[in-house]
Amino acid sequence: MKTGWILVVDDYSDKSKNAINMLYSAFAGYFDYVLPVRLVSDICDEQLAHCNILVAGKIASNRLLKKCLELSLIDVPKKREEYSIFVGASPFNAKNQIIAVAAKDDAALLYGCADFCNKYCGDILFKGADLWDAECFKNPFDRKLNEWKITLCPAIKTRAIWTWGHVIYDYKGFLNNMARLKLNQIVIWNDVVPLNANDIVEYAHSLSIKVIWGFAWGWATKCKDVLKHIAKNGTDDLKRQILSTYNSQYKNVKGDGIYFQSFTELNTSSKKAKMLANTVTELVNEVCAELLRENPNLHIQFGLHATSVKNNLDVIKNVDERIHIIWEDCGAFPYDYYPDNVADFDQTLLLTNTLLTLRGKNEKFGAVLKGMLKLDWNNFEHFSEPYILGERTNSYIANRQIAKEKIWKIIQADWLKNAEYVRKTVAAAKNNKNAIFEALVEDAMFENKIMFPVALYAEILWTPNEDINLIKEQVAKYPCVNFANL
């Protein structure tokens, strides 16, 4: 009779259950029996000697993990979001096996479980196996497992997605897929705060994801008209409008900060560019000073288009140092919508390096990376009425997926070719402790399928020093990853 498996956890609390659920669903699907779950406080060593063990928890409160640590099977996770995993012979009975996921904190537990499901179950588990044997994939956990040890924490602290809210069709599915990729922030831009904003934030927080609400500070589909109005009338009306919008719509809504764009999405002449840079810097500093007086802990992100201000950085460097500048449209891919546009990448990387220290060594730098799916601006319309975000039927989502696959098929080929440019961009920021990267993933049906480019972007944020070909190979094997039209 084969030795059975048991899952041992610290607890099944609101903070840990999403990680445990992810692990359980991936692991238990291989077995024709119900996988038992026990709390570490309720199981003795004698019982542990008679079974294979899958254990997940925080090392400070889990004696099984402490045992693994004593034997140097795992490392001590010391850093924020760091985890350590060991797969091999059980310390309670060498004839049996153990899978140990040890975490520094709740987020790390989620990420350790995600990487076991993705990296081990998608790759390491099958190394050396006879893939043509019909039994190979039936239950690989019934055989001797390949030993694996890994300790990992992210190179980039804040790993995000940026999207308009109305093109999220299932917010729980969207956030679940972010967690599977170890992403920890979402910027949701709206014309109007969704009615279910608090529900979205609560669910995001259960997955260790922060929510940043985005709204316009003078941004419009025709920023040129806004700039003309300001040149004639000044910015006083705009300042009052921004403060009114924040106080009436966002101040009392749950969330982790705000993001804004102003009238900078332009290609301007040198004369107008200087005026624009001065005007937007003054506007941002005055409004943010007022907001931070009333809300000193408010996290603020300033979405800034390099196309209009890159020749006037001597002005932009005067933006309040408390504000994160999230740069957009800095040049070639990965800032460009088209991932085959890499002709001027060297100049783009030089600009990125300049922006990384624009206001000093502690620069609050961020960047929106593109090259995936975006809004169909040909059919875009603003809306001013309240709405419910991320509640659509499965059939609606499935039908929309079909159209998006045609775009993804082209996009994914260019990511296979040009992902190295993403890695170089992220690697440039790896020593900036404040760096934020936000991938534009809009109307991409991400809630339904994790497409290869999104997963590749997410993994690069964790390991930008790895060889890009190894990262691509690893991500392509994730069980949760899809390729278009396959």
Image (spheres, rainbow, N blue to C red):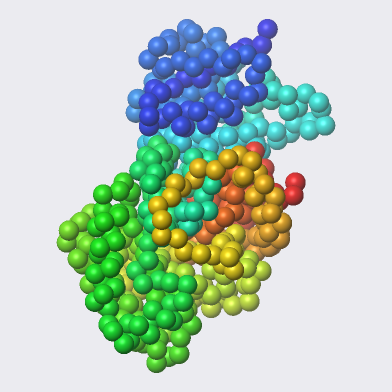
Image point 39% across, 79% down: which residue? 226
Q: Give above or below for 28 relative to 86.
A: above
Image point 62% across, 68% down: which residue? 338
Q: Give above or below for 100 relative to 431.
A: above
Give the residue at the far left of this rendering: 293
Location of the N terminus (image quadrant): top right
Residue 22 location in percent, x, y?
Answer: 52, 31
Q: Give above or below for 111 relative to 363.
A: above
Residue 259 location in percent, x, y?
Answer: 36, 61
Residue 116 location in percent, x, y?
Answer: 56, 34
Q: Is residue 140 visible?
A: yes
Q: Is residue 174 visible?
A: no
Tell whether 230 sits left or right of 307: left
Q: Give above or below for 82 relative to 31.
A: below
Give the residue at the far front of this rendering: 385
Tally the marks: 0
Tell whether 22 sits left or right of 469: left
Closer-to-camera residue (371/40): 371
Which picture quadrant has residue 33?
top right
Image point 81% across, 27% down: which residue? 133
Which picture quadrant has residue 260?
bottom left
Image point 44% across, 22% down: which residue? 9
Residue 398 location in percent, x, y?
Answer: 65, 44
Tell whether 9 sits left or right of 370: left
Closer-to-camera residue (454/44): 454
